[in-house]
Image: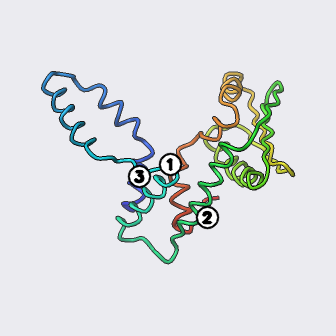
Amino acid sequence: MKPLMIALLLLAFPVAALAQQSHQSHDMAGHEAGVQQHTTSTSIPTETGQDAFATITEIVKLLQNDPETDWSKVSIDALREHLVDMNEVTLNSATKTIESDNSVGFNVTGVGRTIAAIQRMVTAHAPMLAAETGWSVDTNTNDEGATMTIATSNKTELEKIKALGFYGVMTIGAHHQMHHMMMATGMNPH
């Protein structure tokens, strides 16, 4: 496995590292060392800026550190366009939820550029969501955006879908980081 892919997998699982850290003992010497380390590491800003810029920064660092990067295939512009789509869908769309006995439907609408962003994001995410959860996920595009219908016979899962809503189900899966890297390196993530 390439070092870059290993790094991406490690990025996807920071929770395990935090959980392990929380189980360590909290003696006074350890606490003082942690305070000293925190003070030193926060003496200068670490955030690279706005969230899309920070995502691009992270990808560029990974690409620069990978000696196998094929720069002729790299397209940070493609990644940026996807991040704009994510922003459009998250901040500028509206949803209407339609519930039935075994499914939850989301009618996602927008105006202008948001319509195309909804259509791209909903149709691209549906197969990933189905693979990750085992739910039946169907999508259709329309003049105002798209619909996503999620079906399951498991009542607990159905309650989860209702609680998460459209924006919550769009976050499911640890594929987002790899998806971004694939876009930036000229691969088709879909």
Quarter of the rendering containing residue 156: top right
Find out whether the residues at labels 3 and 1 contact each other: C-beta distance under 8 Å. Answer: no
Q: Nearer the viewer, residue 69 or 57?
A: 57
Hey, what amino acid is under mark 2?
Asn
Q: Earlier in the sequence, mark 3 or mark 2?
A: 3
Kindly identify which residue carries mark 3.
Answer: 48
**Front-most of 72 and 52?**
52
Looking at the rendered structure, the kind of residue marked 1 is Asp
Can the viewer see residue 1 in this picture?
Answer: no
Give the residue at the far left of this rendering: 29
Quadrant of the drawing holding the C terminus? bottom right
The image shows residue 35 at horizontal and vertical percentages of: 21, 31
Mark 3 vs mark 2: in front = 3
Label 2 residue SS: loop
Residue drawn at the location 39% of the way across and 40% of the way down: 14
The N terminus - image quarter: bottom left
The answer to whether residue 179 is left or right of residue 170 is left
Q: Which residue is mark 2?
A: 188
- N-terminal label among 1 and 2: 1
- Compared to residue 168, the image places residue 163 above or below, namely above
The image position of residue 71, as x and y in percent, is: 46, 75
User: How crowded is the residue under tag 3: few (<14 C-alpha within 10 Å), some, or many (20+)?
Assistant: few
| 141 relative to 1 in the view: left or right | right
Decide: is 162 above or below 144: above
Note whether 84 is above or below 41 in the view shown.
below
Disc marking residue 51: 1
Residue type for callout 3: Thr
In the depicted view, which residue is nearer to us: 52 or 181? 52
User: Picture coordinates of residue 86 (x, y %)?
Assistant: 63, 49
Q: Position of residue 72 (x, y in %)?
A: 50, 78
